[in-house]
Amino acid sequence: MEIGKKIKRLRIERGFTQVQIKPQHITQSRYSKFEKGETSLSFEDIYEVLTNLQVTMQEFEFFLEPEEFGPIKYRKKLFAYFADPENPENIAVVTQMYQELQEKRSKGDIHPTELMVLFDLKLVCHKIVDQIEEMQEDDLYLIKEMILSRQYHSYYDLKLLSNHIAHFDKKDIETFVKCIFPIPDVATREADTKTIISYFFINIVTKFCYLQEWEDVKYYIKQGHEYCTFGPNYYLKTTLKYYEYLSDYFLTKDFNYLHKATNILSCMLEIGDDKAYKALSDEFNFLMKQEGIDLPTPNHYGGIVLATTSS
């Protein structure tokens, strides 16, 4: 019965009336009782209500307690593992969880939420927990099918796809972006969802950067700016600008663009954004080595003079 009360909270937060979101075949009186917790609705009716609210079923699960929606208990166990991944008790818990989910999957009786947790386990835990295998080709195929089904636009689905974007080819990536974006009502999504949308585009751009397909880099930079319109985002805007300068250099061989790219790296270093600096500087060193450019100071780019290039 608590489900109706939580849907009411979502409805008010998003500015909808009961008439706007209730299924047409349900009377106003019955729907009002549902939101008060006095009656229940079928799964199909709840799904229609959430669709009218522009909330996916998977996003709604985060508002529910395990006793209200069973599959979410696995996610909560996974969160506990992440808090202390070396703890033997937590390792035992995720190992058992992995075995349970694998069995559910083999029987064809696994909920999409449980399947996403299984993939998270494979992605994150296979190097730590011996009994957990890494992602396989059939897993990647299933991720693709789930994304293309347009059932999911939540944080975990985007994160899962983003983390595996390197495994997919150019055509698949193009299809994913066309399928997923624009995300309805993106400005009202949770902060974590907005963050992973940013990482989704950064990871695509990074993939094409390493492939040195610079026209594709510029194309997905443009896509990132177009679809990430939910307010200031330092890391997204800075990183995309860095890639823009880098791609301009490789397309034109104009060293002014390379100098601008190194200025962004210097800025990250100066403000103490060590994680971003490390990721981009490692990549920068790799690309410069491929280009045959000798860097006077490999780990610091402030005031770099790019006259020391090899011919």
Image (tube, rainbow, N blue to C red):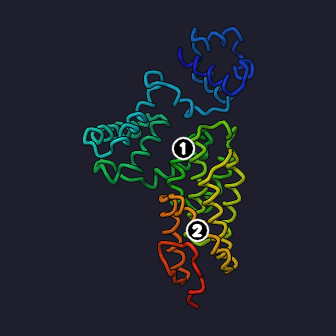
**Residue kind at label 2, given as amino acid type:** Cys
Looking at the rendered structure, the secondary structure element under dot 1 is helix
Looking at the rendered structure, the secondary structure element under dot 2 is helix
Q: Residue furthest left?
A: 88
Residue placed most toward the observer, 142 or 209 = 209
Question: Any mark on residue 67, and which?
Answer: none
Residue positioned 68% across, 39% down in the render: 187
Up-down relation of residue 293 to residue 198 (above or below): below
Q: Quadrant of residue 224?
A: bottom right
Query: Is 258 left or right of 25, judged from the image as shown?
Result: left
Find the distance from the CA under tag 2 to the CA under tag 1: 24 Å
Which is nearer the N-term, disc 2 or disc 1?
A: 1
Residue hosting label 1: 157
- Residue 182 screen position, x and y as percent: 70, 46
Residue positioned 54% across, 59% down in the render: 271
Residue hosting label 2: 209
**Residue kind at label 1, given as amino acid type:** Asp
Residue positioned 69% across, 56% down in the render: 223
Residue positioned 56% across, 30% down in the render: 60
Up-down relation of residue 87 to residue 140 (above or below): above
Give the position of the C terminus as an image quadrant. bottom right
- Residue 70 screen position, x and y as percent: 44, 27
- Residue 219 screen position, x and y as percent: 69, 63
Bin the neighbour count of mark 2 within 10 Å (Cα to Cα): few under 14, some 14-19, many 20 and up.
many
Q: Quadrant of residue 110?
A: top left
- Residue 266 screen position, x and y as percent: 56, 67
Query: Is 57 left or right of 79, judged from the image as shown?
Result: right
Q: Residue furthest bottom?
A: 311
Residue placed most toward the observer, 100 or 69 = 69
Bin the neighbour count of mark 1 within 10 Å (Cα to Cα): few under 14, some 14-19, many 20 and up.
many
Residue placed most toward the observer, 13 or 157 = 13
**Mark 2 or 1: the one toward you:** 2
